[in-house]
Image (tube, rainbow, N blue to C red):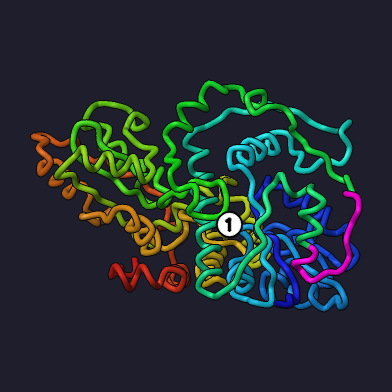
Amino acid sequence: MAFDYFVVLAEMRTGSNLLESNLNAFDGIECHGELFNPGFINTPATERYRDVTLAQRDGDPWRLLNAVRAGGGRMVGFRLFHDHDRRIWDHVLADTACAKIVLTRNPLDSYVSRKIAAATNQWKLGDVKHRKQSRVAFDGAEFEAHLARLQATQIEIQRVLQTTGQSAFYIGYDDANDLSVLNGLARWLGVSARIADLPRALKKQNPEPLEQKLTNPQALPQALARIDRFDLTRTPNFEVRRGPLLPGIHAALSVPLLFLPMRGGPEGAVLDWMAAIDAIAPADLPHDFDQGRLEQWRRAHPGFRSFTVLRHPLRRAHAVFRNRVLTGDMQPVREHMTRLFDFRPEDGERAGFKAFLRFCDASLSGQTGLQPWPAFASQAANLEGYAQAVIPDLILREDDLTEDLATLGRRLGIRTPPAYVPEGDTGLAAVLDDEVRALARRAYRRDYEVFGFADL
């Protein structure tokens, strides 16, 4: 069928800059970069593109999409990653007039490449003499989380294409410089032009063997051996199909107990209690689960209990704001708060917290280009995510943990369960007023309704 425009569905360090450069070598093709990156438009540090500002794009992404598509006479497109504006992601996947180019790369190569780029702050290379080198550490749990996210994205793309009767042009990283493949892609897009040579504007940044890029190559075999490789044909790429992302789950050491933490909740205090059962450090509790290891653990622990803990939405939001937003841990969130809700730290904690609650409301409603993170997503949504792999048989409340954890411990055969030590005061009372209560209820109306929370 004839397409009106195209999108390159890719991820960081999969070769999307290279593919864009090569596509733009065709007369009649125009790729406009990362138009819907939460932090910029088109290229880093660009805050206005086609007379559309960053704030205008965040408020109305269709305005930028229409401005780019209005070029006329050319096949126009852009690059889109899984964490870009969800409104545009959903739109282009469903739009049969949009050609989908799905770019993939060996996930281990993309993982290492991303770590090197972050270490050197060099995200693309035009002149080899300016190349920066660095060796990085391989982290098995981090790589598996990377792998799970890539696979989940690929499964989502495939599912939408199948249910809407569409097909995509799949291209691997190694084919992004293949002249025949690129000309075939142009033909598929309906562009008559062909190229005889590649532009060669970008250079491969890290051509060394994988082991030479790592400070701990000996960690690779053990980590890779744990990965189930029997689902390789699940999607048309080389990524292993994974279950839900489960590294946050922790198990007790000597009793059959699983804890499913809610980000932003009393996670640290509960892990301290679980570790105290065996007089160990929280870091020594079994964790780093994936679907396969979780199933193995459950089979090995018949009669196990699993639980999660709910925190009042207002307390949870304030804890995330104080412990992660104000500390600079959530820089993209701060940038969106500043751009959309006039966040200024010098205005004080109450004003800043109100800006954060307004941002959460907008993000959870799909009105920003930044998708909800687990720390500020609703607890109902986080619980649904866990339920894809394990449904907790106990949903406890933070206010009742002293009694409930003692009861849980005794049910598991612990004669004298350790005392639960609550987290310290977060200073919520100092910023609490009627407007804060109303903003929290509006942002987290689902948690208030589903779990029956009352106003503080």
Dividing the picture into quadrants, the one containing residue 437 is: bottom left
Q: Which residues are magenta?
A: 186-198
Task: Give whichever of 23, 331 is nearer the camera.
Answer: 23
Task: Give whichever of 323, 378 is nearer the camera.
Answer: 378
Task: Give whichever of 322, 136 is nearer the camera.
Answer: 136
Quarter of the figure with the C terminus: bottom left
Dividing the picture into quadrants, the one containing residue 71 is: bottom right
Chief secondary structure of the magenta portion? loop
Residue at 86%, 69% (x, y): give it.
192
- Label 1, on which residue? 348
Amino acid type assigned to the residue bearing label 1 in the image: Gly
Residue 350, image x, y percentages: 52, 60
Q: Work out whether 222 lies above or below 268.
A: above
Dividing the picture into quadrants, the one containing residue 378 is: bottom left
Residue at 27%, 33% (x, y): give it.
275
Asked whether, in this view, residue 371 is left or right of residue 33, the answer is left
Residue 160, image x, y percentages: 53, 69
Q: Work out whether 47 lies above or below 289.
A: below
Residue at 35%, 49% (x, y): give it.
261
Task: Give whichever of 270, 256 is nearer the camera.
Answer: 256
The total number of labels drawn is: 1
Q: Work out whether 219 lies above or below 179.
A: above
Residue 80 visible in the displayed image? no
Asked whether, in this view, residue 8 is left or right of residue 289, the answer is right
Quarter of the figure with the N terminus: bottom right
Q: Residues within 10 Å of mark 1 (few under 14, many from 20)?
A: few
Residue 115, image x, y percentages: 64, 36
* Residue 426 lies in the magenta-colored region: no
Asked whether, in this view, residue 198 is left or right of residue 305, the answer is right
Give the SS element for disc 1.
Answer: loop
